[in-house]
Image (cartoon, rainbow, N blue to C red):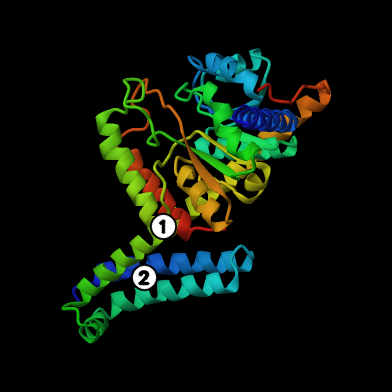
Amino acid sequence: MNYLPLQVIISLFVVIVVFRLTKKYKDKTFKFSEFFGWLIIWLIVLFVFWLPQTTSYLAIFLGVGRGVDLAVYLAVILIFYLIFRLYLKIDKQQKEITKIVRHIAVNETKDTQDRRSKTEDLRPKI
Amino acid sequence: MNCSAVSLWRDGVSKYLKYITAKANNMKVFIIIPCYNESANIAMVINNVKNYGTVVVVDDGSTDNSWQIAENQGIKVIKHLVNRGQGAALETGDNYAISQGADIVVHFDADGQHLPSEIPKLIQPIITNDADVVLGSRFLFLADTKENRIPFIKKWLILKPAIIFQNLLLRIKLTDAHNGFRALTKKALERIKITQDGMAHASEIIEQILKNNLRYIEVPVTIRYYEFGQGLFSGFKIIRDLLIGKINKD
């Protein structure tokens, strides 16, 4: 029971987070799947902090030395995955921005052209 | 006998030339110049190019007065509100050209690297219906004169590896990669959609030429090197963009 202060702090934190989660779910800003996913994650956090030895069983089962090591590995994998997701998302948004910019650019040009309604000689002079 | 054969041949050639010129005169040629902060060169480039077709400058969110200078030359300027990259600017220009009924679109750099006098040579295979896409190549049968010489580092550290990479990846045999001087038919333009906003669009165009079974041809062109163009590391950025583009398709 060396962890007690930390366990209490984490528990309080998780309670606050879960409280906010339920509020968001009630406000319908979160779908049920989102709410449920986040709830599971935070419950796992709570579980791991109160029963840290369980991670050791899991670690031994997966062939990693200690439970803490496993947590670090998983965290790193998760972070890299999230960075990758973010990268793809940014790339997609960049493309969408380009589409918007292009749309505005071409439309504006057409507008000014309609106003002028100038007939140009479009043939090349070769 | 001999004389008549020659005259017959001459007759044929002149008829063919007349046919080509007539055809060329009926074709709408659009010259797309993507431009980002090129106030120093843009006026000169536009004026040199004007005689070869309808010039469309796509100002890619320049922070200088490039677009004003371009507009003062009496040509069409399309303005991107924010900088989106050369690929994005070209695609905008292409879209506009198609909407205006272009038959041939020529991509031309705003920094004066390309020679306007080579435009007829570039669109020739399209007019004679030998190709849908004509790619300029700086490595194809060019005399080793001082003007044609490519800076050593640029040639051996950037261009040659890029060409090898491109040819291996796309299983194609081209003599040049990332040459911005090219001509495309309307048919090709309708099929090729540039989604790479940055410099990777050059590889993307070649990829789409292959995918759509378009006929392509390489034509030797001169590239003048005023300064170092793209930096040494831009090659890696292009590779990264291409890989991400593969994963992230809409």
A49, B52: nearer the viewer: B52
Q: Chain of mark 2?
A: A
B61, B198: nearer the viewer: B198
Which secondary structure lies at badge 1?
loop
Relative image position of residue B78 (x, y in whole percent): 65, 28
- Left or right, A112 with respect to A78, comes to right
Q: Chain of mark 1?
A: B
Relative image position of residue B120 (x, y in whole percent): 58, 28
| Quadrant holding the N terminus of chain A | bottom left
B243, B118: nearer the viewer: B118
Relative to A4, residue B66 above or below = above
Determine which residue is flagged by label 1: B171
Determine which residue is flagged by label 2: A11
Residue density around tag 2, few if under 14, some if 14–19, many if 20 or more, within 10 Å? some
Which residue is depicted at the point 59% across and 73% down? A32
Residue density around tag 1, few if under 14, some if 14–19, many if 20 or more, within 10 Å? few
Q: CA distance from mark 2 to mark 1?
A: 59 Å
Residue type at the position of mark 2: Ser
Which residue is depicted at the point 47% across and 70% down? A38
